[in-house]
Image (cartoon, rainbow, N blue to C red):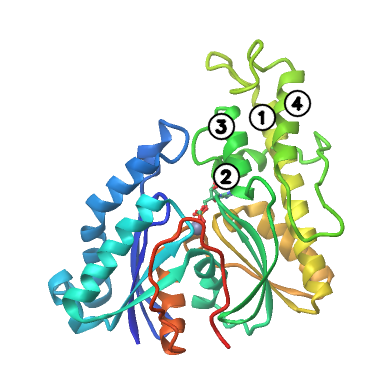
Amino acid sequence: MTVLGIETSCDETSAAVVRNGRVLSNVVYSQVKSHAEFAGVVPELASRMHMERLPAIIERALRGAFGKNASLKTVRRYVSAVAFTQGPGLMGALLMGKIAAQTLAEAHGLRLIGVNHLEGHALAMCLEQKVKAPFMTLIVSGGHTELVHVRTAGRYNVIGRTRDDAAGEVFDKVAKFLRLGYPGGPMVDRLAAKGNPAAVPFTRPMMPGTWDFSFSGIKTAVLYYVRDSGYAGEGRVRPAVPADKTLPEKFTSDLCASFQEAVVDTLVEKTIAAAKRKKVRRVVVGGGVAANRRLREKFKTRAKEEGLSVHFPSMSLCTDNAAMIAYAGALKLKAGRAGKKLAVDPSMRIRSWAA
Ligand code: KG4
Ligand code: ZN
């Protein structure tokens, strides 16, 4: 089965072709440069850019998979279904992907499959590794932090989620008030590599008694630390660092390393504890924050100590991409669960569809 995937939930415009679990092409156009000057994603701009770029991105994905003669006009020769991201995500951005997918499907008589973005992240690693369910999946992205007990593909039990900020969101917000640029995760990751993770002893919000997470406290602690060190703007809480002030390099790298360590410790320890409690031997990590080098390193060390295996997608499949959407869509289609209700939903939750 050959499926064309379309992903437009946030600021990546992506199209991919997946055949029988193998990625034939995966084209990702990142809009990050266009949003950087606003230090965050501007929904209206994201929708417009998806609309403008999507036809060319889809054609690139088709040509990448099938050669230079493949095009939107000849798509039917090559693929049997189109999978698109239904949610969660930005409403206008999701609509652009849906309209493109639906138009192609109706014009060419292809099957149309709606896919949950988080399900895509949870299963992305299956495109590269043979990992048998059940596993405990940690989905860590810019909008979500969820612990999902995956019994099998299509059977999901969400056991914990963030009660406030998502993990990627705190990376982005901390970077924003340190004026490090957008998106913050990769910047903090890079600076943290040069810093001392024990320099500032931030509390780990372990929240005993629940598998839920809470990261807004660490974010505020970072902000107060900057203010109490004399670097915050006068009488202002946000942005903490005035535009005309440059933070000392060592201060910034130690702060980034310490902040990152607190977030990583919390994610790793809670996920491992959940896997052990649910008697699952495999841990899977997905979403943009899964690209974090310290998170990957610490998960590997701790999983080994606990006799668990841990699996990450390669970097390009951690962040938003259409290959994971095509893959999850193919599974649903194979199981006869392509779905009839294909409305987009900005706050869609991951739900089981398999019996
Ligand atoms: O999954 P994703 O591409 O988009 C969403 O579904 O949100 O995740 C984007 C998030 C952003 O918050 C970004 O800062 C974070 O992933 N991220 C990272 C790293 N690379 C991306 N966070 C920490 N370390 C990284 N290396
Ligand atoms: Zn995502």
- Mark in the foreground, 3 or 2: 3
The residue to which callout 4 is attached is 225
The residue to which callout 3 is attached is 176
- How far apart marks 4 and 1 lie (CA) works out to 11 Å
Query: Label 2 is placed on what type of residue?
Result: Gly
Q: Residues within 10 Å of mark 4 (few under 14, many from 20)?
A: some
- How far apart marks 2 and 4 lie (CA) works out to 19 Å
Secondary element at image label 3: helix
Label 2 CB-ligand 1 distance < 8 A: yes
User: Which quadrant holds residue 84?
Assistant: bottom left
Counting from the top left corner in percent of width and height, residue 206 is at: 82, 52
Q: Earlier in the sequence, mark 3 or mark 1?
A: 3
Q: Earlier in the sequence, mark 2 or mark 4?
A: 2
Q: Residues within 10 Å of mark 3 (few under 14, many from 20)?
A: many
Q: Is residue 132 above or below residue 308?
A: below
Is residue 321 left or right of 201 when viewed as pictured? Answer: left
Query: Label 1 is placed on what type of residue?
Result: Thr
- Mark in the foreground, 4 or 1: 4
The residue to which callout 1 is attached is 252
- Mark number, residue 185: 2
- How far apart marks 3 and 4 lie (CA) works out to 15 Å
Q: Is residue 262 above or below residue 333?
A: above
